[in-house]
Image (cartoon, helix red, strand yellow):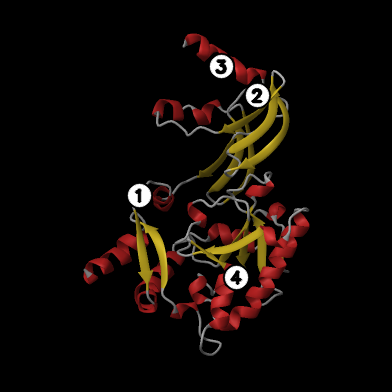
Amino acid sequence: MADDKERAEALLPAFKLERILNHDQAGRRVSLLGHIHAQPAVVVLERAPFPDSGSYLSTIPSTLQWLKNLGANDVYHWYLASSGPGTDEPHPDLKINLFYPATEKHITKYSKQRVRVVNETPQIYQDYVRPFMGRQRDNGRLTWMHNIINGTAETEDVIYRTPVGQEDKEGFVLLPDLNWDRKTLENLHLLALVERDDIWSLRELKRKHIGWLHDMKTKIASATIQTYPGLGEDQLKLYVHYQPTYYHLHIHVVHAALEAGTSQAVGKAVGLESIISQLETMAGDDEAGMHLATLSYTIGEASDLWKEVLEPLSKQVN
């Protein structure tokens, strides 16, 4: 048995790469074709999960061999980093987001919590959820978005923007999302922030907005394709979140090959094309809209919306 183990362990160092077969799972796994002792071999490399050891995790921030800041805006900072030996051309193996100073909202969002499924009727939205949204918008959590929209932050990252203040209520700005490493094309993740401030979420979208949504979709796709050659429009997915983290309409743009995580899962992400189609087929005049629909989504038990609004409502029903 010991000989078999030694022979097996001696195989991998002898691997000679011929070509990359695939790069998937948001860049966490790569499949390689090569040979070992003149025989074909396939190696699949996958990043192992982080351990639960506090003593190990506590050393990571102070022992990074290489660190590059990708940007900063308000309390948000994001980096590429290498935890391995330093070289002249480091290969980052960590994408790091820093929230500092962190609020209770940040702590809650990134804490493990049980998830509930909610069926939000038009009445629940109008009587309970929309007033909650208004209270959240008044607490200063949109500062980072306003910095981008007003052109006072992340200006060097902007991919496309309509002239500030010149598009009336149809302007927007497009730039990389802080969760993208800005290198791996199949992990592409951009964010389009609308300039207007009166649409808090997809709930405010109405039939009268159909033309604007079509136009914005076209401009987003065109700007993305021009910025990243080799991409086709049919390789892009555009969606919005409901419930969103921030109550100011913004559209996510990702590569079609990006494997769906929690943020793209059913019960969180709603395709922009689906929203447009629903509005186009909705009965009524131009004021008919998404506020008239019942929406189902998932929500964590630690979120303020669940604790303050939806949980008390669920107890009333039961």
x then y, percent, for residue 27: 61, 41
Q: Residue under circle 4? A: 273
Marks 4/1 in contact by CB < 8 Å: the verdict is: no
Residue at left offset 45%, top offset 64%: 243
Give the residue at mark 3: 9
**Label 1: few (<14), some (14–19) or many (≥20) C-alpha neighbours in 10 Å:** few
Q: Earlier in the sequence, mark 1 or mark 3?
A: 3
Q: CA distance from mark 4 to mark 1?
A: 31 Å
Which one is earlier in the sequence, the residue at label 2 or at label 4? 2
| Secondary structure under the numbered disc 2 in the rendered image | loop
Quadrant of the image occupied by residue 117? bottom left
Q: CA distance from mark 2 to mark 3?
A: 26 Å
Amino acid of disc 1: Gln
Of badges 2 and 1, nearer the viewer stands 1
Do the numbered discs 4 and 3 sit on residues whose CB atoms are within 8 Å? no
Q: The residue under label 4 is which amino acid type?
A: Glu
User: Of the residues shown, which amino acid type is indicated by label 2?
Assistant: Gly
Whether residue 65 is situated above or below residue 21 in the rendered picture: above
| Tag of residue 113 | 1
Residue occupied by mark 2: 86
Q: Position of residue 8 (x, y in %)?
A: 55, 17
Q: Secondary structure at mark 3?
A: helix
The residue positioned farthest toward the bottom in the image shown: 285
Earlier residue among tags 4 and 3: 3
Circle 2 Cα neighbour tier, 10 Å, few/some/many (<14 / 14–19 / ≥20): few
